[in-house]
């Protein structure tokens, strides 16, 4: 199912809508072992663990992560394998293979991962490798560094066995050819443009990890890097407190270090929901043109309470908790 269609469905039924049916429809490729039920509200009252949440309507990704958690594996494993589902999905045009290219026709990927120890690994502006989330994990675990960029990241990936592949699908190439007719270099942000997957998980031991992976803004300038792979902006985990991740116009998230801000607000006692709202408030205050772009945050605290907030209607969050894999509409700031 196309996300536009889903969002229409969600907005028809209002906040707290759960995509039981929608998730089932999206889930043809790989159905989660547990039944998807329609139910519940946007914020969960009785938190349980393990759990996984993710940006946008990605039921196959959260189902995979949940399966890994049920096997008793770590949140880190769940994050990597969950994110890989969307990276390998050639139809998703904002992540991994099939991602829309920069203005010169190159698909460049950003991804990062954090574990319960606060370790971080990332790649930015990497080409030709389908699974940047896995390369990011290897950077974290197997190198003395935390962030590799461009050809260096690609060379590292190839040196440890990742295969080079062409990531520009026919559909994305055609979309780029079409875009070239006007060549609007300034990225135009709208809701349809955002499919970055940010994912947070708590495993059976209560430990938290997170990941974020994207092809970034469509038709961006060559070399442009967004928030997704930058620690504290697109993702932050503190295993004592919780985690947060972002989607939307990365420049705005970077300027406010949004995910770190949310975790610090939770440390000070705010709920995940309150913290996400305050981080969006920070952007609204600084950027008078907020009507022109979308930013969305999701967060989880150590207790397993979740929250999410965004600027414009249309952002949704996946949550797999208590055997229910659901897509919830996220509350938003711009109600005018
Ligand atoms: C970026 N935050 O590169 C990403 C874009 C995004 O769905 O979220 N796309 O700025």
Image (tube, rainbow, N blue to C red):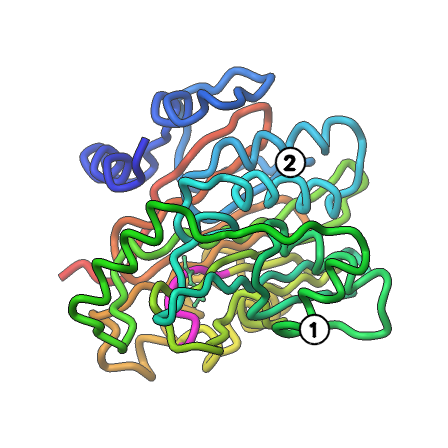
- The boundaries of the magenta stretch are 246-251
Figure check: 142 above or below 77: below
Question: Residue at 63% across / 44% down in the picture?
Answer: 304
Q: Residue furthest left?
A: 336
Q: Residue at x 39, y 38 (%)?
A: 328
Q: Position of residue 71 (x, y in %)?
A: 78, 27
For numbered disc 2, what is the local secondary structure? helix
> Which of the image's four quarters has the C terminus?
bottom left
Indicate the position of residue 329 as horizontal and vertical percent values: 34, 42
- In this image, 268 relative to 39: left or right? right
Spot occupied by residue 294 in the image (x, y as percentages of width and height): 31, 63
Q: Nearer the viewer, mark 2 or mark 1?
A: 1
Q: Indicate the position of residue 163 as horizontal and vertical percent values.
A: 69, 50
Disc on res. 65:
2
Q: Which image quadrant is residue 183 in?
A: bottom left
Circle 1 Cα neighbour tier, 10 Å, few/some/many (<14 / 14–19 / ≥20): some
Name above or below for residue 26 compared with residue 255: above
Is the CB of the residue bearing disc 1 within 8 angstroms of ligand 1?
no
Quarter of the figure that contains the N terminus: top left
* Horizontal side, residue 118 vs residue 261: left or right: right
Numbered tag placed on residue 85 in the rendering: none
Q: Residues within 10 Å of mark 2 (few under 14, many from 20)?
A: many
């Amino acid at each position: 199912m196309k996300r536009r269609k889903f969002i229409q469905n969600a907005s028809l039924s209002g906040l707290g809508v759960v995509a039981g049916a929608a998730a089932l429809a999206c889930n043809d490729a790989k159905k989660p072992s547990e039944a998807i039920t329609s139910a519940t509200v946007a914020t969960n009252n009785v938190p349980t663990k393990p759990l996984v949440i993710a940006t946008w309507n990605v039921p196959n990704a959260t189902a995979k992560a949940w399966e890994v958690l049920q096997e008793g594996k770590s949140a880190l494993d769940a994050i990597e394998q969950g994110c890989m589902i969307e990276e390998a999905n050639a139809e998703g045009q904002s992540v991994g293979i099939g991602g829309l290219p920069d203005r010169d026709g190159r698909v460049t990927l950003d991804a990062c991962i954090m574990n319960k120890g606060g370790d971080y690994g990332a790649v930015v502006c990497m080409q030709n490798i389908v699974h940047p989330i896995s390369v990011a994990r290897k950077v974290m675990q197997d190198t003395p560094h935390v962030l590799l960029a461009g050809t260096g990241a690609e060379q590292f990936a190839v040196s440890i066995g990742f295969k080079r592949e062409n990531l520009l699908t026919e559909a994305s190439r055609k979309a780029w050819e079409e875009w070239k007719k006007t060549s609007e270099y300034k990225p135009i942000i709208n809701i349809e443009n955002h499919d970055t997957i940010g994912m947070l998980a708590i495993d059976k031991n209560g430990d938290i990890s997170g990941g974020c992976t994207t092809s970034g803004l469509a038709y961006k300038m060559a070399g442009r890097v967004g928030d997704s792979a930058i620690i504290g902006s697109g993702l932050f985990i503190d295993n004592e407190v919780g985690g947060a991740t972002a989607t939307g116009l990365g420049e705005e998230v970077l300027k406010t270090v949004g995910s770190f801000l949310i975790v610090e607000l939770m440390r000070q006692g705010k709920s995940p929901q309150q913290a996400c709202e305050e981080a969006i408030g920070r952007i609204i205050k600084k950027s008078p043109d907020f009507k022109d772009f979308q930013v969305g945050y999701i967060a989880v605290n150590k207790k397993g309470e979740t929250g999410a907030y965004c600027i414009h209607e249309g952002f949704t969050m996946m949550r797999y908790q208590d055997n229910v894999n659901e897509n919830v509409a996220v509350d938003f700031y711009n109600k005018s």
